[in-house]
């Protein structure tokens, strides 16, 4: 097979580069969502609405555990992309090696915590209905136990994205997606292992994707061939990876906590609302993928260009990203107002749940423009090294999602529909905060700070300079 090479994004047409980088990311993210959709459809149609509600009750918590690792991987990608853009190849390789150690450690730790805490989290934190508790705990233990596999895939994905390659991980993810659907059908429909089988199918598929992609990438990509000198534990570099990744991980964790709080509110309305919420969330996970892919592309683009001292080119990339996200948001909103009912009926069957699910899609689709703003601004600022914004973003989501749900349900008595009004309000506020942060210009100082940190690291660790 031919070698895989890194891609320099500091030259060429900005919009074309971002779009060409985004499309493979989007295909990969959509394939990842097939994991969740396969679980949803097979569990919902094969095991019934109660089983689907039990699986849905775990979603916010498993997302919390996996995003801790995703944040660290994203932080590593920021460092690697800036070193690559600056042409600091030896420091880049040191960041790759030390970020792998950090990610592996936290992945294993979080996997163990997920297994141990599954029942108390479901029983105490989420107040999952007693009749759904055994299924929810079983699914969560297996899904969270596989967090280390998720961490490994997110890490190699972040490394390759930082080097401008968004296509290679897609190849392995495609195989894993097909495998996941096949294992889902085998475990649930043939072997009758229930929701535990659906969780096991997803974990095994994720593990295969991570291991195969890592082996292939290190064998075929010259930039990833690490010498003995590169494979040294550098506490300074590990600290830089952690300091850069933790704010992003904290942001993701706070978003997950807000989702847990909203899930608890949802659980209080009973199984019909839980089923509608689970179905609408599965659909919206797909909807968010184009925005997430665009944001990831912007992170790499801005990271490389900031590293290369080209801030105006980075700005041009942001403007192109905002135009793309706005066009996409309008198209998807029209689609769901016209065909949202058919989409929901493809997942669940109960008429009352279907009606609520369709209502959910119509409400939240009105705010897709602001959802796009969130991802584009976040990706740009993360790539520029302004990871402190990630904390602001997380706090805003917690305040809006938790506060909005409480105010609308308790004070105004809106009822279960407040769940989806709260989601739209959260996207509106958080999206505007992201744009205000960009226009405030703090990221420019953060970019200078990144260069200073590299100079400081060179002074403290001359063997990696």
Image: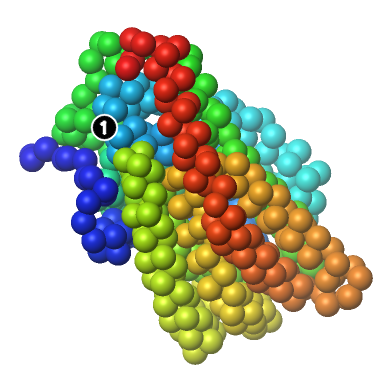
Rendered image coloring scheme: rainbow
Q: In this orientation, which residue lies closer to the viewer: 383 or 189?
A: 383
Would you name the residue on which mark 1 appears? 87
- Residue at image location 45% in from the left, 12% down from the top: 460
Left or right side of 219 for 88: right
Residue 390 lies, in percent from the top left, at: 59, 46
Residue 222 lies, in percent from the top left, at: 17, 30
| Above or below for 324 versus 95 | below
Question: Tag 1, which secondary structure?
Answer: loop
| Above or below for 238 versus 152 | above
Q: In this orientation, which residue lies closer to the viewer: 337 or 176?
A: 337
Which of the 4 quarters of the picture holds residue 23? bottom left
Any part of residue 5 in sight = yes
The N terminus lies in which quarter of the figure? top left
For disc 1, the neighbor class at 10 Å (few under 14, some 14 to 19, many from 20) is: some
Left or right side of 337 for 269: right
Any part of residue 47 in sight = no
Residue 64 lies, in percent from the top left, at: 61, 44
Left or right side of 3 for 345: right
Residue 72 lies, in percent from the top left, at: 50, 35
| Above or below for 118 versus 311 | above
């Amino acid at each position: 097979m031919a070698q895989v090479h890194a891609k320099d994004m500091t030259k060429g047409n900005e919009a074309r580069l971002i779009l060409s980088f985004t499309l493979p990311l989007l295909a990969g993210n959509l394939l990842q969502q097939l994991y969740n959709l396969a679980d949803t459809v097979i569990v919902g149609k094969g095991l019934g609405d109660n089983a689907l509600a039990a699986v849905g009750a775990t979603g916010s918590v498993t997302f919390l555990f996996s995003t801790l690792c995703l944040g660290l991987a994203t932080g590593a990608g920021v460092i690697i992309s800036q070193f690559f853009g600056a042409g600091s190849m030896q420091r880049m390789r040191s960041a790759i090696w030390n970020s792998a150690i950090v990610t592996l450690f936290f992945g294993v730790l979080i996997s163990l915590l997920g297994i141990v805490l599954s029942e108390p989290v479901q029983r105490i934190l989420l107040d999952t209905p007693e009749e759904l508790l055994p299924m929810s705990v079983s699914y969560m233990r297996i899904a969270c136990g596989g967090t280390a596999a998720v961490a490994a895939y997110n890490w190699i994905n972040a490394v390759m994205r930082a080097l401008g390659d968004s296509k290679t991980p897609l190849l392995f993810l495609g195989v894993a997606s097909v495998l996941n659907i096949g294992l889902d059908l085998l475990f649930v429909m043939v072997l009758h292992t229930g929701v535990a089988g659906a969780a096991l199918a997803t974990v095994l598929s994720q593990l295969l994707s991570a291991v195969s992609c890592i082996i292939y990438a290190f064998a075929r990509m010259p930039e990833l061939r690490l010498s003995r000198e590169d494979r040294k534990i550098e506490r300074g570099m590990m600290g830089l990876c952690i300091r850069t990744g933790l704010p992003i991980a904290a942001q993701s964790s706070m978003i997950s906590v807000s989702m847990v709080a909203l899930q608890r509110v949802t659980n209080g309305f009973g199984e019909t609302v839980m089923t509608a919420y689970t179905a609408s969330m599965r659909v919206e996970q797909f909807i968010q993928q184009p925005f997430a892919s665009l944001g990831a592309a912007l992170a790499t683009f801005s990271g490389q260009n900031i590293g290369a001292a080209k801030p105006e080119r980075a700005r041009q990339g942001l403007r192109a990203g905002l135009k793309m996200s706005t066009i996409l948001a309008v198209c998807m909103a029209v689609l769901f107002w016209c065909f949202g009912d058919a989409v929901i009926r493809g997942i669940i069957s109960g008429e009352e749940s279907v009606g609520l699910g369709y209502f959910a899609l119509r409400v939240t689709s009105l705010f897709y423009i602001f959802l796009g703003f969130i991802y584009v601004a976040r990706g740009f600022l993360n790539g520029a090294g302004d990871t402190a914004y990630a904390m602001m973003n997380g706090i805003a989501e917690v305040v809006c999602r938790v506060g909005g749900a409480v105010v609308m349900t308790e004070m105004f008595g809106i009822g279960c529909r407040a769940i989806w009004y709260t989601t739209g309000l959260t996207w509106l506020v958080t999206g505007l905060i992201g744009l205000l942060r960009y226009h405030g210009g703090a990221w420019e100082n953060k970019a200078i700070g990144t260069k200073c940190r590299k100079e400081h690291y060179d002074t403290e660790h001359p063997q990696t300079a």
